[in-house]
């Protein structure tokens, strides 16, 4: 669900009928998807169920993966963080290991909806829902992460840069299930920062920006200012040019909550703030 | 085209209920209409207002964003389960009474389940933390002022209960 | 001596069931097994001819019991084929239009009901709605006041200029006074649409009992008697065949005073015809597109004043967007046009308005009901005068106040109830002094300078209002003391969270000298009190509170009469404490209220030990009728309160805001309220009403609006996009001070308090943001995006 006029059908609040399967193994789940071209995966359901209730989506079958074993892992190692498909946002956010290995994941997760939604919603689900207004797809892309998916032909890894192919559209095949997401660790001398402006606390942001500063490299990720999660390289730019350079690569639009002009202003302000904050973090880490 | 019914066992407030529901039956509807636990209210059915919040394995979740068939293997707590075994009001309920934390009462169950879990995690919240605890629930009557007070008062009552239990 | 309950912070008695999850809201009503559920097909177009509705294969769907369109209505009940009632006619409402229960050949807003389906459950009913196909001929929509005024397209082809009503009132010759004034200013001021959005939407359940030919309807309404009368007429039933019960209501804020909604008629009709209980519960999106909105108005002000800022003449013209239909008449714009004057003497005053049709959801009162707009207009005008003259904004207001010795004060206009706009009491200078102290008005300039030195922008605003509360025609109450000594109170208006079961019990308990726990209050049940008006216009405490006081006093009189007889004492020597009547100074000589109730009802048949004392061989003078000619059996009191006119509450708010120089975000630093609703029955409840009003006002000022596109689609018909404040958006504290200027118009000296908190919000935030920014805010609500655009505009065109 995204802000700005994605209205449901009139007077509809209950889902249309669907077939329900709750497989006990990943293979069965994949088979469940493969067996019905109208099938969809149900994980946390925090984005999917409203779409079903407003009948904006009417899958013929739901494959509920909540009963699958071993998909709720949150593993943080020296190279990065691997988050299983059933790990809830709240658990990822609560993990000290995740915060230590890749703090941007935690910084961004704190801005994902409200706590109650984070208790049920899954981080991997949010990533493959591919909403350009959501935090985690952008973060995955900025960090150069990836998603592991299982399909009838076995497993494959999709790099974040190849994951987002259009508005609300990922490159997963219909019969594939995302089993985990991978966020590389923050480099030893690198810094990150995240900030967003929303109308109400917990709403989808009017604009959100994350920065990753690593040595000379400065990159920033943007949400709600493009159709897809977008990353812009801001290396070797003067402070004053950051915002305008970013804007040249972005396409802030109008909606009922904010004008394109205002979004552009938020891009300028937030870009400067997060780049400065990420640099400060890197500087602090480099300090003896 | 009659819909296939799924026989599921829901564990609610410590009681197991066997129900037969079509897959599309929202958990909120199943609680209210299949089990008759009408204390859980439905205010928006798109996950924003929080009136339908119940505890699933102790954590607040939107019952309008879950299907009953998917709620097997969980312990669910609704507002009806917040009352003490002797039928006296639980600490959160008592605090709402004392602080005038409700007016029309429609959103109240969702607030109380949320706060019950919140105090479990943080038994003595600051005022800011109290506000944060209820930040995902809408109320149109109270302006939240007395709900924040209720959170703080509930923490006191809970604390007093714990002290009594461990002399 | 029983402690007096009036004026104390009594905990609410209704909370016990709410807190346990045992409230009974309309969707919780179990009207019996085999209850069916309804859903409605609604128009996806703002303006269209409905050429044909295809329902052929809908009944084929398993579990579907009925599908109706307009064509079916006349056969089901002849009056159902007529438009819905025009609830409040007015001579100037020359072109009133109301909708049909189901669209008759034309739809005039997105969301208008076209077909009604009854099925086994709501899921199946929605499946069925999805099968209905409609052929439309789309017509050009009229969206917004500008489009309505231009009249390039018409909403109703027989309403020229889209004008439903033109109205004018004046007191003195305002144009002449302005022409002769030393200073003149003009302002153009806009307020956008918003809506009540109670957490519970509308809903109706009905059950037809064929054994006794009687209908029971539960509806989430603000007027059970109104719904009852409408159902009887539309279904062709006698009033005595229809009972309407208002269960617990999950908030109203005005929208549930309009009636009958199409479903309030279609549900009982279906229950009667299908012989099974039927339930309709609106979903949130339906509430957005098929209930009611309010607030949309555009105003033009001309004001003349002297060198000190004293008003000499005020001429206001405004345009009110009433949406597609006018069931509630002109109440909202009439209130704006009169209550705009607030606590001020305007000099000569003229107000003119046009009420305009648009292809949008209809407009009926929302908490404040036209007053927020009026307050916005008057208070922006006051600020403009102060800015023009370089004077303190509070001083300009004080100069124009009606003074405490000038009451009753007649503004020379006709109010919303058809009565004189005559203020009964108030003390505006005292309120202003309290407010200035509460918010730190005098200290603010130093604070502002201190913030500016840190690169921070802050601003302060204040706004004053007067609210006519407790309008007629009447409310009544029935008080019954049972033989257990328990007191049952019934009043007909409804409850939506205001704590009536508590405050009304406080009033009755005080009069009767019984413990609060012994009083039980029932509201909104036509079986218990069939004569009532409804809950709106901050009238419940004033109207039903007064009626209960009067009815309880009648019961008390009878108590004392019987007790005096039984105790062989003079009535003047009796007192009632904790449910026992005793002779003052001789507590041994006493009799319980329950016993008096027994004695009040001469019996032939005893039913327990106590009642034996009232049987025919035990009591009575054999030479007189057992019930005296001017008496009646039972210990009851019934009375009605019907005041000549409204009582006028007042208040003033102030707010300090901070605006972010870069992101234009608006943060509330302090919010202060001074409120005068006469004597407070329960300060805890009054403060709760103020808190809620302020929060709703914050929503209306900074977050909420109805975002219609040019085709008449409502783009934000969900809680996702209609931005009602969470706790994170409201002030962290609301400082409240009370003034108690009693009303001389009712026995308790009370005034209404329900709407007050929301009235000055748009005005006070516009003032504070203007102060922070250095340019005047003339349109509300305002978002950071809009504030940012205004900054750009004022940088380009310095004023």
Image (cartoon, coloured by chain):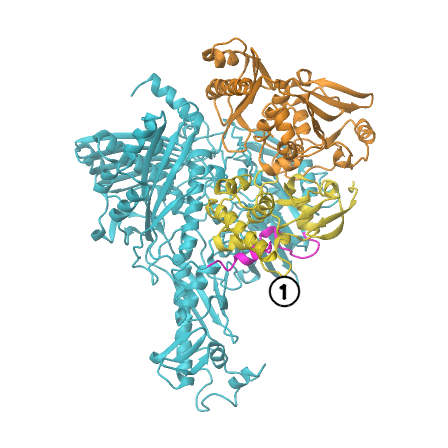
Which region shows up in magenta? C11-35
- Neighbourhood count class around disc 1 (C-alpha, 10 Å): few under 14, some 14–19, many 20 upward: few
Chain identifier, yellow in the render: B
**Residue A266: % across, % down:** 48, 21
Dominant SS of magenta comes to: loop
Relative to C716, does residue B10 appear above or below in the rendering?
below
Mark 1 residue element: loop
Looking at the picture, tell me which residue is in the foreground, C35 or C48: C35
Q: Chain C is drawn in which colour?
A: cyan
**Residue under the image location 62 percent in, 55 percent down:** C29
Taking the magenta stretch, the answer to whether it contains residue C752 is no
Task: State the hue of chain A.
Answer: orange
Question: Viewed as shown, does residue C780 lie left or right of C379?
Answer: right
- Specify whether residue B97 is in view: yes
Determine which quarter of the picture holds residue A285. Answer: top right
Residue C758 sits in quarter: top left
Q: In this view, does A192 lie above or below C473?
A: above
Observer-nearest residue: C350 or C780?
Answer: C780
Q: Nearer the viewer, residue C732 or C198?
A: C732
Residue C19 among magenta residues: yes
Disc 1 target residue: C212
The residue shown at (28%, 33%) is C445
Viewed as shown, does residue B129 lie left or right of A28? left
Answer whether residue C322 is visible to the viewer in this image: no
Residue C143 percent across, percent down from the top left? 47, 30
Q: Position of residue C41 (x, y in %)?
A: 62, 39
Q: Position of residue A124 (x, y in %)?
A: 68, 28
Tell me: residue A23, above or below residue C617.
above
- Look at the image and tell me in which quarter the N terminus of chain C lies: bottom left
- For this rendering, which residue is in front, C676 or C450? C450
Answer with the quarter of the image where residue C212 lies. bottom right
Quadrant holding the C terminus of chain C = top left
């Amino acid at each position: 669900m995204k802000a700005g006029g994605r209205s449901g059908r009139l007077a509809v609040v209950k889902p249309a009928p669907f077939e329900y399967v709750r497989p006990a193994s990943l293979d069965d789940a994949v088979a469940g998807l493969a067996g019905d071209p109208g099938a969809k995966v149900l994980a946390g359901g925090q984005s999917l169920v409203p779409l079903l209730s407003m009948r904006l989506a009417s899958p013929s079958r739901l494959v509920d993966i909540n009963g699958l074993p071993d998909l709720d892992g949150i593993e943080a190692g020296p190279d990065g963080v691997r988050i299983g498909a059933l790990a809830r946002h709240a658990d990822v956010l609560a993990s000290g290991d995740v915060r230590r290995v890749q703090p941007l994941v935690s910084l961004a997760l704190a801005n994902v909806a409200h706590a109650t939604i984070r208790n049920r919603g899954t981080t991997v689900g949010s990533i493959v829902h591919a909403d350009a207004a959501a935090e985690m797809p952008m973060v995955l892309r900025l960090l150069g992460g990836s998603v592991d998916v299982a399909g009838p032909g076995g497993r494959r890894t999709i790099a974040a840069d190849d994951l987002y192919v259009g508005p609300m559209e990922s490159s997963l095949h219909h019969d594939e299930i995302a089993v985990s997401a991978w966020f590389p660790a923050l480099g030893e001398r690198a810094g990150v920062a995240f900030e967003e402006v929303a109308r109400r606390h917990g709403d989808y942001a009017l604009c959100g920006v994350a920065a990753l500063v690593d040595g000379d490299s400065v990159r920033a990720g943007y949400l709600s200012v493009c159709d897809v999660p977008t990353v812009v390289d801001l290396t070797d730019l003067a402070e004053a040019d950051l915002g305008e350079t970013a804007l040249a690569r972005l396409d802030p639009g109008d909606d009922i909550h904010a004008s394109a002009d205002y979004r552009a202003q938020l891009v300028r302000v937030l870009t400067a703030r997060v780049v400065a904050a990420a640099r400060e973090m890197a500087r602090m880490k480099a300090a003896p | 085209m009659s819909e296939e019914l799924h026989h599921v066992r829901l564990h609610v407030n410590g009681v197991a209920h066997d129900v037969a529901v079509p897959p599309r039956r929202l958990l909120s509807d199943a609680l209210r209409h299949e089990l008759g636990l009408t204390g859980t209210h439905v205010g928006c059915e798109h996950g924003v207002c929080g009136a339908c919040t119940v505890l699933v394995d102790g954590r607040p979740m939107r019952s309008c964003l879950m299907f009953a068939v998917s709620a097997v293997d969980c312990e669910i707590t609704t507002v009806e389960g917040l009352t003490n075994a002797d039928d006296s009001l639980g600490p959160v309920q008592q605090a709402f009474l004392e602080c005038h934390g409700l007016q029309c009462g429609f959103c109240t169950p969702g607030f109380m389940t949320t706060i019950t879990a919140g105090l479990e995690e943080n038994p003595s919240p600051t005022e800011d933390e109290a506000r944060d605890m209820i930040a995902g629930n809408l109320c149109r009557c109270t302006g939240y002022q007395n709900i924040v007070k209720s959170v703080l008062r509930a923490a006191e009552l809970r604390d007093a209960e714990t002290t009594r239990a461990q002399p | 001596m029983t402690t007096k309950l009036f004026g104390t912070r009594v905990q609410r008695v209704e909370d016990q069931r709410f807190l346990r999850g045992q409230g009974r809201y309309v969707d919780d009503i179990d009207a019996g097994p085999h209850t069916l559920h309804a859903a409605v097909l609604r128009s996806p177009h703002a303006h269209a001819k409905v050429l044909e509705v295809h329902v052929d294969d809908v009944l084929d769907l398993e579990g579907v019991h009925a599908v109706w369109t307009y064509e079916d209505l006349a056969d089901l009940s002849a009056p159902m084929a007529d438009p819905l009632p025009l609830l409040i006619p007015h001579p100037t409402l020359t072109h009133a239009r109301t909708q049909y229960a189901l669209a008759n050949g034309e739809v005039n807003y997105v969301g208008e009901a076209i077909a009604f389906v009854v099925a086994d459950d709501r899921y199946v009913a929605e499946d069925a709605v999805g099968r209905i196909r409609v052929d439309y001929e789309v017509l050009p929509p009229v969206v917004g006041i500008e489009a309505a005024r231009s009249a390039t397209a018409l909403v109703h082809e027989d309403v020229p200029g889209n004008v439903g009503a033109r109205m004018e009132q004046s007191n003195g010759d305002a144009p002449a006074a302005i022409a002769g004034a030393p200073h003149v200013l003009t302002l153009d001021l806009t307020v956008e649409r918003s809506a009540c959005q109670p957490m519970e939407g509308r809903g109706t359940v009905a059950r037809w009992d064929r054994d006794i030919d009687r209908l029971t309807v539960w509806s989430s309404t603000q007027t059970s008697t109104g719904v009852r009368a409408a159902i009887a007429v539309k279904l062709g039933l006698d009033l005595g065949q229809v009972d309407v019960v208002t269960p617990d209501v999950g908030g109203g804020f005005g929208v549930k005073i309009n009636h009958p909604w199409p479903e309030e008629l279609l549900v009982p009709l279906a229950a009667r015809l299908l012989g099974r209980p039927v339930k309709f519960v609106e979903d949130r999106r339906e509430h957005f597109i098929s209930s009611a909105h309010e607030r949309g108005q555009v105003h033009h002000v001309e004001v003349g004043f002297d060198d000190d800022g004293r008003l000499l003449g005020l001429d206001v013209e405004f345009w009110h967007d009433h949406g597609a239909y006018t069931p509630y008449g002109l109440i909202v714009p009439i209130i704006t046009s009169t209550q705009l004057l607030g606590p001020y003497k305007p000099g000569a005053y003229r107000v003119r308005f046009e009420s305009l049709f648009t292809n949008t959801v209809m407009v009926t009162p929302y908490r404040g009901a036209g007053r927020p707009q009026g307050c916005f207009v008057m208070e922006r005008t006051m600020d403009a005068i102060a800015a023009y003259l370089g004077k303190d904004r509070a001083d300009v207001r004080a100069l124009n106040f009606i003074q405490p010795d000038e009451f009753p004060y007649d503004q020379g206009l006709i109010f919303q109830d058809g009565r004189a706009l005559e203020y009964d009491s108030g003390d505006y200078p005292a309120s202003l002094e309290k407010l200035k102290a509460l918010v730190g008005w005098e200290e603010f300039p130093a604070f502002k300078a201190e913030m500016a030195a840190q690169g921070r922008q802050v601003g302060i605003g204040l706004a004053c209002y007067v609210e006519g509360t407790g309008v007629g025609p009447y409310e009544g109450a029935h008080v019954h003391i049972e033989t257990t000594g328990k007191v049952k109170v019934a009043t007909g208006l409804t409850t939506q969270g205001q704590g009536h079961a508590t405050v009304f019990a406080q009033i009755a308990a005080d009069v009767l000298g019984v413990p609060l726990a012994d009083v039980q209050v029932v509201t909104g049940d036509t079986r218990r009190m069939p004569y009532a008006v409804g809950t709106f216009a901050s009238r419940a405490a004033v109207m039903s509170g007064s009626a209960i006081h009067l009815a309880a006093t009648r019961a008390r009189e009878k108590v004392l009469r019987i007790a005096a007889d039984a105790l062989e004492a003079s009535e003047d020597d009796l007192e009632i404490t904790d449910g026992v009547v005793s002779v003052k100074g001789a507590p041994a000589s006493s009799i319980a209220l329950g016993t008096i109730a027994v004695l009040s009802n001469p019996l032939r048949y005893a039913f327990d030990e106590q009642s034996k004392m009232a049987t025919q061989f035990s009591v009575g003078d054999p030479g007189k009728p057992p019930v005296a000619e001017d008496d009646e059996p039972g210990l009851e009191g019934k009375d009605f309160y019907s005041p000549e006119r409204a009582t006028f509450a007042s208040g003033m708010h102030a707010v300090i805001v901070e605006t972010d120089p870069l992101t234009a975000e608006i943060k509330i630093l302090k919010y202060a309220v001074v409120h005068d609703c006469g004597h407070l029955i329960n300060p805890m409840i009054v403060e709760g009403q103020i808190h809620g009003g302020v929060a709703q006002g914050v929503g209306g000022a900074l977050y909420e609006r109805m975002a219609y596109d040019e085709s008449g689609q409502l783009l934000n018909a969900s809680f996702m996009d209609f931005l009602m404040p969470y706790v994170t958006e409201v002030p962290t504290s609301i400082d409240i001070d009370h003034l108690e200027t009693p009303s001389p118009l009712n026995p308790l000296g009370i005034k209404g308090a329900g709407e007050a908190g929301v009235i000055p919000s748009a005005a006070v935030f516009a003032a504070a943001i203007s102060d922070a920014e250095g340019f005047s805010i003339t349109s509300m609500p305002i978002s950071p995006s809009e504030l940012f655009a205004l900054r750009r505009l004022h940088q380009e065109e310095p004023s």
